Amino acid sequence: MAVPNPPTSRDVARLAGVSQATVSYALTGRGTISATTRERVLQVAASIGYRPNLAARSMRTRRTGQLAVVTGTVLDHQLRVLTGAGEVAEAAGYAVRTHSIDGTVEHRTDRVRELAASRQYEGILTLVPVGADALTDRAATGERDGGTPVVAEATFDEQMRSLGDLADATAVRELVDALAAAGFRRFAHVAGPAQYASARARRDVYLASVERLAGAGVTSLGVLGGEWSAESGRLAAHALPDDAPPVAVIAANDTVAAGVLRGVGERGWTAPGDVAVTGWDDVEIGAHLTPSLTTVAVDFTEAGRRAMHRLLAVLRGEPRPTTDGPIHRVVWRESTGGGRDAGQRVRSA
Amino acid sequence: MAVPNPPTSRDVARLAGVSQATVSYALTGRGTISATTRERVLQVAASIGYRPNLAARSMRTRRTGQLAVVTGTVLDHQLRVLTGAGEVAEAAGYAVRTHSIDGTVEHRTDRVRELAASRQYEGILTLVPVGADALTDRAATGERDGGTPVVAEATFDEQMRSLGDLADATAVRELVDALAAAGFRRFAHVAGPAQYASARARRDVYLASVERLAGAGVTSLGVLGGEWSAESGRLAAHALPDDAPPVAVIAANDTVAAGVLRGVGERGWTAPGDVAVTGWDDVEIGAHLTPSLTTVAVDFTEAGRRAMHRLLAVLRGEPRPTTDGPIHRVVWRESTGGGRDAGQRVRSA
DNA sequence: CTGAAAGCGCTTACAG
DNA sequence: CTGAAAGCGCTTACAG
């Protein structure tokens, strides 16, 4: 019944016939130590199932070895982002704790500040939008002040350029260009909540893309919506003028797009004949809607990995990692008409 | 540039004119201490922003104060389960780390065993299916051996009764009964992966419900599928015999159900006229499908809270908490015909 | 009701 | 290349 105390480095030392310091050197690979001794120590440690007491190590090194990732409950794909972030953090020797924070942006910002003040974490990565003044990732250089670094997955830098892979909205331009090439002249955007950098980025690229094609007769019927909800999309469809069709609607995500499709049906319009619709995220159901939904597939796990790499760079005082390839890919389906053809036509252009 | 060391309990003691022991007593509320002293100590602690060093505390108390929650990447709703679990753990004074584990059930089981052996956690809650022999939650009593307790959100007990709120499939019977009352005589089930307790429970309740109505001429065309995927649902629809309609299809979740709806359309059948379809989870898009999807709404956050309460009960050596009310609610929509009416007819019966 | 002292299990200069 | 010793910041019997 009595559980024996777990073995300590002292036990390993005694059994290996060395000092505790030598055990520490063998395990951390830090000091100078002969290969023979190291081998023997590791052998003994493994044989008795020795596991270093992390609390003791943490106290001595004055490092917690802990990072926090802040999630919300609004966007389900954050689970995959979290997974990618955790994977990279673990590989770097950090433990990750998650904190779910909802409520107003002010409340979320306060909570993140509290986490930073708790001294419990060496760094914080937030997947939910918080006030920019709570972030320490603003400068392009890796400079540090004394506080706990706080990095957001998606945000904007000083020049208001979107930062973070999920805020990369360049695929919107691909959508607009292809649909314009396919003949659409009227567009509309159903945006997500403006507090999300990703939503703002999609809106901005939408506006810029349509503007760029103004010379070709392309116009925008406006930016509608403002929530990550299907109902927001449905209402947006109902808000379109009666003579809107043919019109292409760029929705902020797949859920919003599903609502648009429903609203389009309720108005007696057809998709994609009267209204072409695009989503974002490539949720699995989208491929099985009727019409199946053109969307932007996102590698959320990779987004999480990259975000964590950014936080680690700040922790190490290194410059922000140079961006890798895109994690977005447009998936053409029936809701934009021509499906695969439309995409191929554009891609080969 | 030089960051001052954070204040320690020693600093608080000096400033408050008491000993370090008194500070500890004041903060933990453990020893005998006068209200006046305690008040003064807390005041001083707050004024200098004192935060106990958790690593030091942990080393001394020989408790890590850490729990692990194991998630996967297959089911997005685990983010909400995680949130509920984290909320309860935090309120109980525990820190929660998450580990994302995918792969085969054998691999997942091994990894959970490693986590349990790491001595890093006081308890482990897994949201992904693992081998029953990795769990310590099997007995109804709170008995403990020396190892780290491992509790699964959803599993089966010795009598093969489903345990854990997400494995509560009683709503399936409500679906079958209502659809039978609405006139359906032929049923089919598109199941989820058998390694999931929730999928097995839905299948079992489906089979039992149909069997129970055999006297009324109700028959099952079989159990199809076996994945949490829309494609699995689509293929199941194509596997139905040509003369299946009218038939009611109980799908394992909304994603599968969306695939069924797509497959039904591809076969030239109508829903719900020829094929009634039900899902599970109440994903937001479901309400905006055409036809909108009858489903079972699940309070995932509450499921997470309850699962964590079960783990805490094991940790405290208490008996398993008595089950609270259901966290499931059938939502009748167009995909079962009559929509709200069908539900109301049954509910008032 | 309060304080002096020991010790949790590590790591790290430092001495040899 | 290895060891003796100190100390990280707490908590907890124990003495008063």
Image (tube, coloured by chain):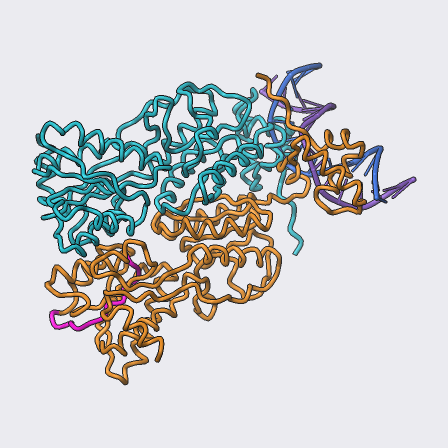
Chain colours: A cyan, B orange, C blue, D purple
Residue B232 drawn at (x, y percent): 23, 57
**Nearest the eye: B129 or B263:** B263
Q: Quadrant of residue A337?
A: top left
Percent across and percent down for residue D6 are 73, 23
Residue at 47% across, 22% down? A316
Q: Is residue A122 above or below residue B339?
A: above
| B6 in relation to B218, above or below | above
Q: Position of residue B78 (x, y in %)?
A: 40, 51
Q: Residue at 57% x, 58% y: name it.
A: B314
Quarter of the rendering occupied by the C terminus of chain A? top left
Residue at (13%, 65%) from the top-left corner?
B269
Residue lying farthest bottom? B215
Left or right relative to A184: residue B73: right
Residue drawn 36% across and 45% down?
A75
Q: Is residue A58 left or right of residue A165?
A: right
Left or right? Give the position of A300 relative to B327.
left
Residue A284 % position (x, y): 25, 50
Can the viewer see residue A15 in this picture?
no
Q: Which residues are magenta?
A: B242-254
Residue B8 seen anywhere in this rendered image of the structure: yes
- Tally the numbered discs: 0
User: In what quadrant of the picture does the N terminus of chain A appear?
Assistant: bottom right
Q: Is residue A46 magenta?
A: no
Looking at the picture, tell me which residue is in the foreground, A256 or A56: A256
